[in-house]
Structure formats: C-alpha cells, structure tokens
Image (cartoon, helix red, strand yellow):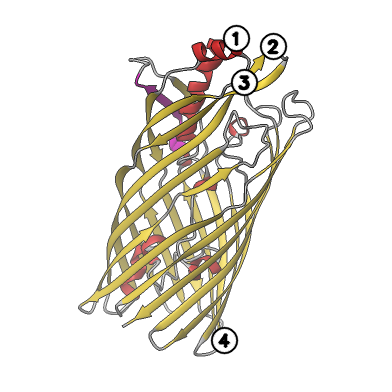
Amino acid sequence: MRRFSRTWVLISALILVGGSAFGSGFGLFEQGAKATAMGGAFAATADDPSAIFYNVAGLAQQRHTNFMFGGTLINFANQFTGDPNDPFAAGTTGYYKNHTFVVPNAYVVVPVGGNITFGVGLMAPFGLRTDWADPWVGRSSSRDANIKVASIEPAVAWQSSSGLLAIGAGVEYRRGRVILSSNVLEPNPFNERISDVASNFLSSSWKSGTTWNVGVLLKPGKWRIGAAYRADMDLKFKGDLAVTQIPTGIVPFDALVKASLPPNQGVETTIPFPAVASLGLATTAVPNWDFEADYTRTTWSRFRQLTVTGDLSGATPLISRAENWNDTSSYRVGANHTVNATWDVRFGLLYDQNPQPTEAVSPLLPDSDREGATFGVGWHKGPLTIDATEFVLHFKSRSTRGLSPDLNGKYKTDANLVSVNFGYRF
C-alpha cells in the first residue's frame, strides 16, 4: 500500500505538466472567427485585428482604428471503450460530462502616420478541459483536468509606401494555471473489491512568462505570401497537492489507508512551450474569391525530458523520465467569397498532426490526429462587422494498443466549435 501511494504522488506530479502544454488537443488556434472560417489558413491574409495572433505583419495593412471582440464556444463528445485484454478496463465505457467551453479574444488596432500600425490582443492560446462523467473506470488517472491559459500581446507593424512589403513584431505575456482531480483506488482485502480510498486535488498558482513573435507579408500583384514565427518559451509551474481520505466504513482497512496516504505537499516543474512557424500563400486571381493555403510547424520535440520535484523530495526528483515528443505539421486551406458589398461566405479544411506517443495516451489527454471542415459568413455595413463560423472537428480513433501503464482502450472524440466576432471600425 505504501508503494502504491508513492506511485500516485508521481503520477499526480506528472499530471501537473502533462496536459498543461504538451498536447495539441490543448492548443487553441481559433483566435478569430474569419480566420477560423478559412480553416485557420490566414498567415497570408491577416486583414483583421486577429493578425496579432496569425501574422503580426498583417496589422500594417489595416489603416483604420478598429476594435474587435468575441470568442469560440467548444463542445466535445468523447467515448472511451476498454481494451478487452485489459483486466481492469475490459467491458467498460466512459464519456465526458457535457460542458461548453468559452475561448475569448479581443483586439484593438490603431494606425499611426502613413506606414505604422499598433495593436493589442487578448487571447487564450492554450486551454480546455477533460471532465469525465461518473461512473468512470479511469478516475485513478484523471477525473477532471482544467487547463487555463491567457495571453496579452502588444504589437507593431510597418508597411512600405507601395504596400508590397510589411513586417511586424509583438511581445506576448502569457499566464497559466492548472487544476486537476483524481481518485486513489486500493484493493480491499476485507471485501475483495477495489475501493476508492482518497480524492486528490492539485491546483497550481498562476504563473507567467514572456515570448515574442514576428511576421512578414509580401503582396506582389494578385498574390500574397505570409510568414509568421512565435518563439518558444519556458514557464515554471508550482502547485499544491492535497489528498483527502474517503472512508470505506471498514475500520481496519481505513486505518491502513490513512497510514499509507502521502502527505500534502507542493510540486513544481518547468514547461518548455514550443515554437510555432507558419507559411501561407494566397491569391485573388479569381474575381470575388480569396484562396489561401498554409503550412504550420510546431516544435513539440522540445519536450525531451520531464523532471518534477516536490517539497518533501529534497534533491531527488519525484520523477525524471524521457518523453521524446515529435515536431508536428498542420495543413490548412481556406477561401473567402465576396457575395456583395455586405456579405461574404467562407470555407476551410484542415489536417492537424498530434505529437503524443501511444504510450502517453491517457484519460487526461486522449489526443490524436485531427481533420476539420469549416463554414462561415461575414456581414459588414458601414463601421460594423459581424463574423460567424461553424467548425466540425473529428479526431481519429486512438488506441493505447496495450502500451498504457494506467488504462488501455480506445478513445473516439469529436468537437463542434462556433466562433463569433463583432468589430467596429472608425
């Protein structure tokens, strides 16, 4: 029992960092409704204030003071089916609780002189939640994981007098927090069943760090070429682990459990967030149509080693192990069709790889490669704009293939995202 309790402390420390930054399922690329409607293929268009996120150089082509705010509503449908060869998971199923997640954004753009534009953006580039409904066989791995990240970025861009070339740069101030819960399970020798003997709650404080991004935009004739780079960064998380015993009503067993549960303590680790580079090519060669194709590369391979320390572990890490994640690629295409002076319609497709090795797939982060399709509309009249998007995202089925140390089975996930932005231009 003591061995089991110490193992749980290690798993809890791992959970603190596992879902907070390293699953592409927790990366949020939906930071503007127009860009989302084009499948996220926006690095070479970048013609609204969300350029601060997609390609900061695009700010320079916006020559009016502009406010834009809104967000994305996200709903997940997830199903776990236990591996018939896993004695613990066989014959079981699990589902997420029904939640609607709101990912906000807000931007302001102000031109200065004839060639320079300033902007400030508020975004949530990482986040989401995996909250499993009872009864849940994987509750010892994770019951609820709530990841919150918010960023604010001031930026500036310059455009040549001819409009052929624009360059931009910004500084991102990022804050994050992690809240997680799970249960401790023990074999009960008095009734020969598995009992829930403790609940665990891990909460980190808000931690902050800074990174930077740059972009360039070329517009020769009816073509546009955009390139953007957001640098990597490290963020040091500190959290408190609290363990609360769940009485079973069997006094001798509860006494054994109480003696073996780990004490409350703090844990900490440093997270290497990846760099993200995007390259986009767009054209207006077809009248009333804008087409764009983007390629994005994310350096998840920075996550080579995981080291976690605890307040009571001294100089010895609670856990230190190789992770060996891979860099990933995403492919995005999109189109914007001008119907008339008031309405636009938009379409997009995307394919997004995930960096997660099979042995790391778990209830906390059942990630997989993703395919998505988008449709959106834009309404603009005078100084007002409204953009709305429907985005259907399908995660390929992901099996642990018997390699998980915790819970083996197959995960199926789908998501529906609705994005809306309101804008006012002076």
Does 314 sit above or below residue 386?
above
In the rendered structure, which disc, 3 or 4, sits on the residue that comes first in sequence?
A: 3
In the rendered structure, which disc, 2 or 4, sits on the residue that comes first in sequence?
A: 2
The numbered mark at residue 248 is 3
Using the rendered view, name the quadrant where residue 153 is placed: bottom left
Q: Which residue is mark 4?
A: 339
SS for callout 3:
loop
Disc 1/disc 3 C-alpha distance (Å) = 10 Å
Amino acid identity at mark 3: Thr
Is 359 placed left or right of 422 in the picture? right
Q: Which residue is mark 2?
A: 190
**In this orientation, which residue lies closer to the viewer: 166 or 340?**
340
In the rendered structure, which disc, 1 or 2, sits on the residue that comes first in sequence?
A: 2
SS for callout 2:
loop
Q: Which residue is mark 1?
A: 252
Does 307 sit above or below residue 340?
above
Does 210 sit above or below residue 68?
above
